[in-house]
Structures are given as structure tokens and as C-alpha cells.
Amino acid sequence: MNILFFTTISPFPQNGGEKIRSCYLLKALAALGHNVHAIIGNKENVNLEEYAISGVTIYTDNPAPLTVADRLTGKFYFRQQPSVIRRFVEICSSVHIDVAILDYGFVGQYIPWFSAGRIPVILGTHNAQAEHTQQKPANGLVQKLRRSQLVNLERTHEQRFFPQAAAVMTVSEPDKQYHARFIDPKKIFVVPNFLDENDYDVQEERNPRVLAMTANFSMYMNYEGLKWLVEQVWDEELASKFELQLVGRHSKEALQQLKGATEWKNIKAIGKVPDIKPYIAQAAGVLIPLLHGSGTRLKCLEAMALGTPVIGTAKGVEGVVSDNFIVANTPASFRKAISSFSGKGQLGGLLREDFLKEYSAGVNSRRLQHILHFAAQKAPVVTHQLAAE
């Protein structure tokens, strides 16, 4: 198949969960033998030749920053960007596209453009976004009103555009159930977040005194989880037993905001790193103290792929199929779980086995191929010139 893939994400480098998802979708599509024409962002202005994937032709589109009026009115949830449409025209005028994949966030407004050209669309979601926004903490009337406005805008977008897709791809069963409220369940499929197991054959010596929390700490759910961990769980006893490394974007800023420093009670903020895998591989365990969110946590899957035990809240490991997590939901029980953790035993190996069964690239490539064939049969493709709207 010839596939047009569009996302507003900048998948390279892979230093965030949403980036990892989009990157491995591209790699899986190419590995299946499809020709992929991918329109992506490149906000970090990296040399994309260093991230070349055989079978994937990369085009870039970096949207202009939202204006104050855009943010206040929410028009961007429904507006097609002319630069994106020009890219669609450029590709569809030179290549017979069999299926379009629109990946992540609020890009449903582009489905009608493809429908006009009889090109079936797979809409890829990374979570139940409106539910995600509903969980965001809000202090005071103004913040609560703003949150309510965003939730209403996002639900309107989802309910107006998502049912128009030939197929909808979710990352977890709970997310599928959410979308089934307004989409025919027969065309909703689960392809969980997944990783290429070959990329996670990392050998590092374990340090039994090091724990890791990996995240983009500018995302509210990660910041709030860190806040809960630092303020309600971590104490002098834990600090005497373990060093906690915060690894990822804005980790230094997050700890600085919470405690006025980038090191506090044996918690060290490392910041953004080019490759997060060695930090996970050498840690005795990974902490996922999340209180908000939906979908599946790629930070959880990375720990599983590297055979690193996980201590998390139920929300932190939500949507991931395994009985081998250490789960605690109150400050006292989470503190006890960390205090009694030794890193010894078979938990890491069992998590690796669970990963290979459900979240490996091999397993999920087959799921992805099934969705492609389903979508391709929903609307015959006709060859004609598509014009910009």
C-alpha cells in the first residue's frame, strides 16, 4: 500500500512518549512493506537524515504558534491549516494513496478532505483526550471555567469528526470503550503502545541503590505525580536507601519549582537526555506515581522491555496487561513498597516476558496490518486530482 501518514508530533528524537508512539508506527508500517509518505513536525530542528527509515519519505510541517484569539475561541480544533492541505495535495497529486493515517490529537478536521477523494482514513488516538483534559487539576473559578471550555471543545471535535473515519485506532481497551460512546464499535481497534524489542537489547550493570522516574515533566500528569511523590511519599528513610533519578524533559525545572533546587533528599534531576534507555536499564526499579491520565504509559513499557521492575500506582500502570507490577495507591503504601523493594527476584524478567507477548513490534505489526486491510475496504480509491480547499 501507499500510505499517507500525518501527525503534528515531532517523532525525532524519541525523547517523549508521544514521539515514541508515532516513531514506532512509522517503523512498523515500513517493516510491513508499505510505502509511507509521512508529514511530521520537526520542532527541535534535528537533521532528519540521521533518523531515516527505509520505506518512509519524510515531509515536514511546523504549525505556526497559536494566537491569543485562537486560544480563546478554540477555532484551531476545527480549522484546516493551509500548509497541511498543500502537503496533502503535493503527495496525492503524485502518488496513488490507498489509506491515510492521521495520528494523535485533534486532527479529525482533515478527514473530510480525504473523504472527498475517496481515501479511507485511520484516525490514531494516543489517549481519550477529552477525558484526559477533564482530569487536569484546576484551582479557582477561572481555571475551572477554562478547563470546562477545553473539554467541551475537545468532545465536540471528537464527536463531529472521529465517526467519519474508516477506522479508529486506540491504545487501550478503556480508551476503546470511551470512543465507543459515539463511534461504531466495529470500526474501533486497539493497537497498544509498542516498542521494537531489538532496540531494547541494552546491557547495563544494575545499581541496587538507584531508582528512576522517566517522563516529560512539563506534562501536568507527570508533574502532579512527581509532586505527590516528593511531598507525600519521599522521606529521610527512603533517601538513605535510594537515589532517585528524574530523567527527561523539564525534570530540572519541575524539581526546582517544587523544592527550589535540582537536587533534594537524594533526588537528582538529570534533565533531557539523548537516550533514556541506559538510565532505565541500570536502575534497580522504575517509579510511575501517576494520579491522572489515560491510554498506556510508554515509560511503563520501556521498563518492561528492559526487564526493570516497576513500582506504580494503578493509574501509572493502567491499560498494561501484566500481573507483575508492584502497585500502591496511597502515600503510605507507596512509601512501604519502595522501602521494602530490593530489586532482587524475577519481577524484571517476568515483565520482559509480558512485554514480548503483548507490546512488541512483531505482535503489533500484525494488528496494524489488520486495521489497514479493514480500512482499505471501506472506500474504493479513485484516481483524480485533489485540490486544496
Image (cartoon, grey):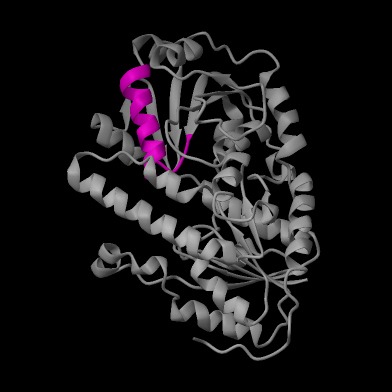
- In the rendered image, residue 9, in percent from the top left (x then y), is placed at 50, 60
- In the rendered image, residue 337, in percent from the top left (x then y), is placed at 50, 13
Foreground of the two, 384 or 1: 384
Is residue 183 left or right of 353 when viewed as pictured?
left
Residue 100 sits inside the magenta stretch: no
Foreground of the two, 114 or 345: 114
In which image quadrant can residue 204 be found?
A: top right
Q: Residue at x 52, y 83 (%)?
A: 86
Q: Majority secondary structure of the magenta segment?
A: helix
- In the rendered image, residue 100, in percent from the top left (x then y), is placed at 65, 70
Query: How many numbered callouts?
Result: 0
- In the rendered image, residue 265, in percent from the top left (x then y), is placed at 33, 19
In which image quadrant can residue 192 be found?
A: top right
Q: Residue at x 68, y 40 (%)?
A: 200
Q: Residue at x 59, y 28 (%)?
A: 282
Answer whether residue 250 is visible to the viewer in this image. no
Seen in the picture, residue 115 relative to 218 is either above or below; the reply is: below
Is residue 371 left or right of 287 when viewed as pictured?
right
- Residue that protrudes farthest toward the left in the picture: 141
Segment tinted magenta in the rendering: 214-233
Is residue 243 left or right of 27 when viewed as pictured?
left
Answer whether residue 32 is visible to the viewer in this image. yes
Quarter of the figure with the N terminus: bottom right
Q: Residue at x 35, y 41 (%)?
A: 136
Foreground of the two, 247 or 32: 32
